[in-house]
Image (tube, grey):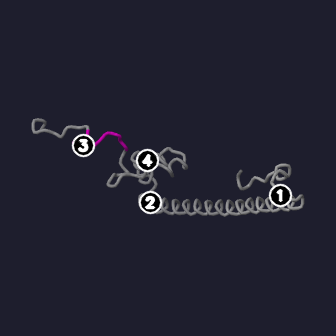
Amino acid sequence: MGMGMVLPAEVLATVPDLSAAQQAELRKILLQRRDADEATQQKFRAQFDALHLQERNEHERIEAQSSEQLRKLLGDEGYRHFAEWRLSHRGPPGGGMPRRERDHAAPGRAGWDQTAPYSDAPPPGGPGHAAPSEADE
């Protein structure tokens, strides 16, 4: 039984050695606990949603400020070229994954250039590849 579930009066009647008054009071206490738990959950969910909105707004403000600075530095045409270059090296924002999946994806490997296109292939000379020989040169 979960903490939010309140047993029906019929079930509480099967608890040994409880009077009818105790059963009624027990059910009342369980209902109060459930209602308090639900109110707490709603309160913290509202705080979480407000904080998430604040974070998103701050991210958008920073992104707009950065874009403005880049446009000022590069001009409209240069900014467009930079944005195309960046997209070709990083892919779409979020890597094409929904946010929830992206947040739980494995972190990048140390020393791995995360701005470079991704490849599953091991580096030359690494496991699965023969090191270049003198005959190849």
- In the rendered image, which residue does mark 4 sit on? 87
Seen at 42% across and 52% down, the residue is 107
2 vs 4, front mark: 4
Q: Quadrant of residue 24?
A: bottom right
- Label 4 sits on a secondary structure element that is helix
- In this orientation, which residue lies closer to the viewer: 118 or 73? 118
For disc 3, the neighbor class at 10 Å (few under 14, some 14 to 19, many from 20) is: few
Distance from label 3 to label 2 (Cα)?
39 Å
For disc 1, the neighbor class at 10 Å (few under 14, some 14 to 19, many from 20) is: few
Q: Reply yes or no: does residue 121 show up in magenta.
A: yes
Left or right, 2 with respect to 130, comes to: right
Chain-order first, disc 4 or disc 1: 1
Residue at the far front in the pictured view: 17
Chain-order first, disc 3 or disc 2: 2
What range of the chain is rendered magenta? Answer: 118-127
- In the rendered image, which residue does mark 1 sit on? 17
Chain-order first, disc 2 or disc 1: 1
- In the rendered image, which residue does mark 3 sit on? 126
Q: Residue 133, relative to residue 44: is it above or below?
A: above
The picture places residue 83, in percent across and down from the top left corner, at 44, 50
- In the rendered image, which residue does mark 2 sit on? 70
Q: Reply yes or no: does residue 24 show up in magenta.
A: no
Distance from label 1 to label 3 (Cα)?
73 Å
Residue at the far left in the pictured view: 135
- Looking at the figure, which quarter contains the C terminus? top left
Distance from label 2 to label 1 (Cα)?
76 Å
- Label 1 sits on a secondary structure element that is loop
Left or right, 48 with respect to 23, comes to: left
